[in-house]
């Protein structure tokens, strides 16, 4: 868990080896940068085994959930895992709407030496999280909620990383493996 971030890190994809190749990683980085940094008009773009959803409202949260379920289903995840993935996406997407106002979520299939999975990268250029460690504690909330969003998403996924700093936005990367 890290509490540092820079503008370049906000749209940084995972290493290319986690995607289907360097081209997929480049598409993720450029698309997230376009949506988060420059305000693209498209709310959702689907690129074969990857989708990028702009998050600005509750309707976008639902769109991101649906895209996540569709991509994870194509990878062969079970119905219960599809629900887990959709729930993690919802938690992170709701945080974007509530705390940052807007951002983007990329959902991509992973293929790492025959190991398959799905990766979700959520990025925003909002106010950031001043103390990531505290924000990851169960029950901690600055928005009056139950404080289960970030720690809940971490528990649901196999891998979870958050990069954030006050005034610099937040990037959450989550992975679930078959």
Image (cartoon, helix red, strand yellow):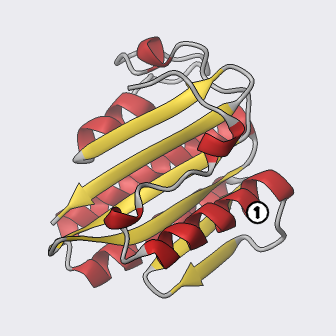
User: x and y percent of residue 27 in the render?
Assistant: 59, 73
As drawn, 76 above or below 102: below
Q: Quadrant of residue 143?
A: top right
Quadrant assignment for the C terminus: bottom left
User: x and y percent of residue 70 in the render?
Assistant: 39, 78
Q: Quadrant of residue 124?
A: top right
State left or right for residue 161 relative to residue 84.
right
> Can you name the residue that lies furthest to the bottom here?
48
State left or right for residue 100 relative to residue 150.
right
User: x and y percent of residue 65 in the render?
Assistant: 47, 64
User: Is residue 18 visible in this depiction of the protein?
Assistant: yes
User: Is residue 66 visible in this depiction of the protein?
Assistant: no
Where is mark 1, residue-wise? 34
Quadrant assignment for the N terminus: top left
At horizontal 43% and vertical 54% (from top left) the residue drawn is: 14
Across the whole image, how many numbered discs are drawn on residues? 1
Q: Nearer the viewer, residue 129 or 68?
A: 129
User: x and y percent of residue 41 in the render?
Assistant: 84, 70
Query: Disc 1 on helix, strand or loop?
Result: helix
At horizontal 33% and vertical 63% (from top left) the residue drawn is: 18
Q: Nearer the viewer, residue 111 or 157?
A: 111
State left or right for residue 164 relative to residue 126.
left
At horizontal 44% and vertical 11% (from top left) the residue drawn is: 134
**Mark 1 closeness class: few <14, some 14–19, many ≥20 residues within 10 Å:** some
At horizontal 37% and vertical 60% (from top left) the residue drawn is: 119
């Amino acid at each position: 868990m890290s509490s540092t971030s820079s503008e370049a890190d906000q749209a940084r994809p995972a290493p290319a080896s986690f995607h289907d190749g360097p081209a997929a990683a480049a598409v993720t980085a450029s698309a997230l940068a376009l949506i988060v940094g420059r305000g693209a008009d498209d709310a959702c773009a689907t690129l074969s085994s990857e989708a990028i959803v702009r998050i600005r409202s509750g309707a976008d949260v639902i769109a991101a959930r649906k895209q996540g379920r569709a991509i994870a289903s194509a990878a062969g995840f079970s119905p219960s895992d599809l629900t887990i993935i959709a729930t993690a996406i919802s938690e992170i997407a709701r945080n974007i709407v509530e705390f940052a106002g807007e951002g983007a979520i990329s959902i991509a299939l992973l293929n790492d030496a025959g190991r398959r999975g799905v990766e979700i990268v959520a990025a925003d250029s909002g106010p950031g999280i001043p103390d990531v460690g505290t924000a990851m504690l169960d029950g901690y909330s600055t928005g009056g909620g139950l404080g289960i969003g970030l720690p809940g998403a971490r528990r649901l996924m196999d891998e979870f990383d958050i990069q954030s700093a006050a005034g610099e936005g937040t990037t959450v990367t989550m992975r679930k493996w078959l």
